[in-house]
Structures are given as structure tokens and as C-alpha cells.
Image: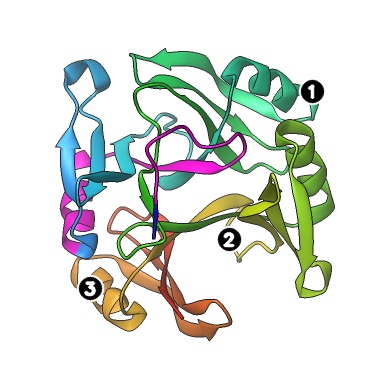
Amino acid sequence: MVTRSEAWPEGTPCWVQLGVDDLDTAVAFYRALFGWEVERDGPAAGGYVNCTVGGRQVAGIGSRMDEGRPTAWITYLAADDVDEVAGRITAAGGRVLIEPFDVMDLGRMTVALDPMGAAFGVWRSREHIGVELANEPSALVWNEQLSDDLDAAKHFYQAVFGYTYDDIEGGSYAMLKVAGRVVGGLGYDTPPGRPPHWRTYFEVPVTDAACVKVAELGGRVVVPPTDTPYGRLARVADDQGAHFYVIQGN
């Protein structure tokens, strides 16, 4: 279990947010699946929902910011200065989709596309540090970007966030490291029908039981439970079509 009460180091995946058309439906789905408690922000924040486990923030649910993109989970990477990072994104060949802006007194953010086409967010924390609980059932456990050009992805993210890498799996996967600590991954792979993207993994007590629950709630199991060196995992989709992974740790 990892708990946090201060800003995450730059480059660390620090928050995940689901963008949907129907907030109430999404809240009902994830409360039933993960047992999340929810805190709704006021009208000024568009009814944004902060999801918690034991009073600690684990994820957010909000309205889709771009109707041209599918319902999806987006990974936010921590930044010391969002505006500087936005400049590095553009210089490295990425594209800023939403110019940096302040989110009340909570923080400052931007949303961008990397050169491969994967969307991600950047977050500079103030009152809202992002994830306060990780590596625990019902909480975030892993984030990774998947594309068909691993070398280009490594070059881009190193230029923007200064990552160093540990290459594994015969060079088809790279562990992202911040100050020597592994924080996420880059992989050479894109599932059929899906463009480059960032994946979100949530820990669960039992992967098979979580898949049964997903189906009962109107979602679907996209890739059935599979044993891996890192735990038993499955790719699922919620009842509005957003894909994510559930994993039962070893």
C-alpha cells in the first residue's frame, strides 16, 4: 500500500480520470464494482466526482472534455510547472489539446497528445495532490502507454519528463523511472481496433470475481483473466465503453 499527502514528483502518474457522458451511471457502476465513496463538487466544477477509499482520493469522474474522443480513462502525469511542460510537449512533437488552465484552487492542468496519438493529462497540484492511495484493492496500481513505436515514445517522454528507462521483455517494454524509482511503463503493442493510448490498472482482491461483477453491472470482459508474472489480470470495459484493467497481485 502507498499513501501520499504531498505533491508527486514530476513525471509520476498522479491521477486518473474517467470522462463520460452520464456521470450518474458511471458513479453507480464504479461504486458497485470497487466500493468507492464519492464526493461531488459543486456546479462551478461541473459536478465533478472525486472517488475515495477510506477517505483517501483514488480517481475522478467527470464529463467528457472532447466529444470527438471516446469515453476513456486518462492518466495525468505530475508536473512542477504545467506551462513549461506544455512547451516541452510541443517542442518534442506532441500537441496540446487544452491549453494550461487553473482548476479553482485545486491545481493547474493541461491535456495533450503524444506524437503517437495517445492522450494524457498533466497536473500541477495545489489543494488537490491527486492520488492519495495506491497499490491497494480498489485503487490505482499501474499506468502504461502502448503504441506501435516504442523508440519514438521513449524519446518523447524522456524529452518532456526526463525519464530514464529499464528495458525488459526483449526490448519490447520500458519501465519509466523517476529519480531511480519505477513509476510506469511504455510498451510496444496496440490491441486490434484501438489506437495508441494510456492504460489504467486497478487492483482487485480476486480478478475472476471482479470480471463477473463487471458483467453483472452491464460492462463486459474484453480479455479474460490471465496469469502473468505480475499477477492475474483482465481487460474489461464499463457500461459506457471505457476500457481498463483489473489485476490481482501476487
Depth check: give the residue in front, 138 or 90.
138
> Disc 3 designates what residue?
213
Q: Specify start and end residues of the magenta stretch as a single range.
A: 3-32
Density class for disc 2 (Cα within 10 Å; few <14, some 14-19, many ≥20) is few
Label 2 SS? loop
Residue 197 seen in render: yes
> Disc 1 designates what residue?
91
Pick whichever of labels 3 and 2 is earlier in the sequence.
Answer: 2
Does 189 appear in magenta?
no
Answer left or right for 42 relative to 205. Answer: left
Q: Is residue 61 above or below residue 210?
A: above
Q: What percent of the width, then of the height, locates residue 61?
A: 30, 40
Kind of residue indicated by mark 3: Lys
**Occupied quadrant, residue 216:** bottom left
Q: What percent of the width, then of the height, locates residue 241?
A: 36, 55
Q: Residue at x 61, y 66 (%)?
A: 192
Q: Residue 193 shows which numbered tag?
A: 2
The N terminus sits in image quarter: bottom left
Label 3 SS? helix
